[in-house]
Image (cartoon, grey):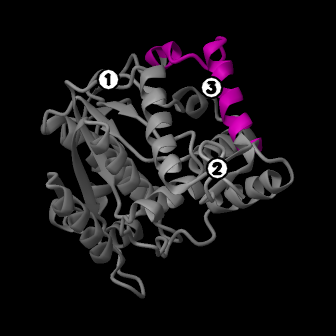
Amino acid sequence: MICNTCGQKAAIRMRQHRLALCKDHYLEWIIDQTQRFIEKYDMFDRREQVLVAVSGGKDSLALWDVLWRLGYQTAGMYIHLGIARETEYSDLSEQYAREFAAERGLPLHIVNVEEEFGQTIPELAQVSRRGRSKPCAVCGLVKRHTMNRTARELGFDVLATAHNLDDEAAFLFGNVLGWNIRQLRRQAPYLPEKDGFARKVKPFCRFTERETAAYALLRGINYIEDECPYAVGSKQIEYKNLLNQLEENQPGAKLRFMLGFLQAREDGFFPLEEIAEEDLDLRPCPSCGQPTTTGGLCSLCRLLENA
């Protein structure tokens, strides 16, 4: 297998693109494709401050590395969730994020959930009916709230997350399976700033998990390889496995699925404008000040009130 660009030995073959590249040209390809996607959706420019949500894993550290190499003004944010099941998962994840930032001289903002809210994610999940069996829903709620608040309070122009194609395709599959129209309207590579919500972007959402892992490996990025211990058996994992089976038989199926959805959005299906109509009743939470559609406390503050 040889590189389609230079004829040297290829480091990776991407069947969905009918493309094989050597190490150097693959690293260039990831950076070039990321820049093109940023420009396509007008996500941000080099004058703006970008807060990158990092977990210590391959996707988020690879994204931060690419944006840094492209010359964007970036800082990282790590949320310590207090997960220590079998291994000190959160501590190890923070260590990788710290080392990455230190090696590149980049700022890293750390939010500790236990210090911020008085309890860890597993502990908060125990007081929530939707989180007792698995804390994933509570974890997602806390992370979304914390990321938005941190981006707003620290004055960042945009919040970037490292959702990859596998994440987005699985999320889309689940939403189509249940015809969750509200979530389908909100699934996009770019969500504009509005009514207390920071601008949110996903520059990596066209890359597969395999592609981001290859970038991290070839770039020499150290990251935590363990998955969250609570992820086992989640619906997202189940959807990813189903889509991977389809991808094995039909290379490019996940990418076509996602790009077809984005094209449908451009053609008028699930338009972003309808989100504004849904959120006409947004108001600040009387406790934390974050936007909410409820008549009183936001979902997180209601959870904390019962903790």
Looking at numbered disc 2 in the image, what kind of residue is underneath it? Gly
- Identify the disc placed on residue 262: 3
Viewer-side label of 3, 2: 2
Mark 1 or mark 2: name the one nearer the start of the chain. 2
Q: Is residue 104 magenta?
A: no
Q: CA distance from mark 1 to mark 2?
A: 45 Å
Residue at (47, 49) in percent of width and height: 27
Q: Disc 3 and disc 2: Cα gap in Å?
A: 34 Å
Furthest residue toward right: 249
Sequence-first tag of 3 and 2 = 2
Above or below: residue 86 compared with residue 20: below
Mark 1 is surrounded, within 10 Å at the Cα level, by few (under 14), some (14 to 19) or many (20 or more) other residues, namely: few
Label 3 packing within 10 angstroms: few (<14), some (14-19), many (20+) = some
Question: Hey, what amino acid is under mark 3?
Answer: Leu
What percent of the width, then of the height, locates residue 292?
Answer: 33, 32
Location of residue 238 (image quadrant): bottom right
Residue 174 in the figure: left or right of residue 96? right
Residue tagged 2:
7
Element at label 1: loop
Residue denoted by label 1: 193
Q: Amino acid at mark 1?
A: Glu
| Position of residue 257 measured from the top left corner of the image (x, y, whole percent) | 73, 36
Q: Residue at x 16, y 62 (%)?
A: 102
Dividing the picture into quadrants, the one containing residue 298 is top left
Q: Residue at x 56, y 34 (%)?
A: 183
Q: Which region is colored magenta?
A: 253-277
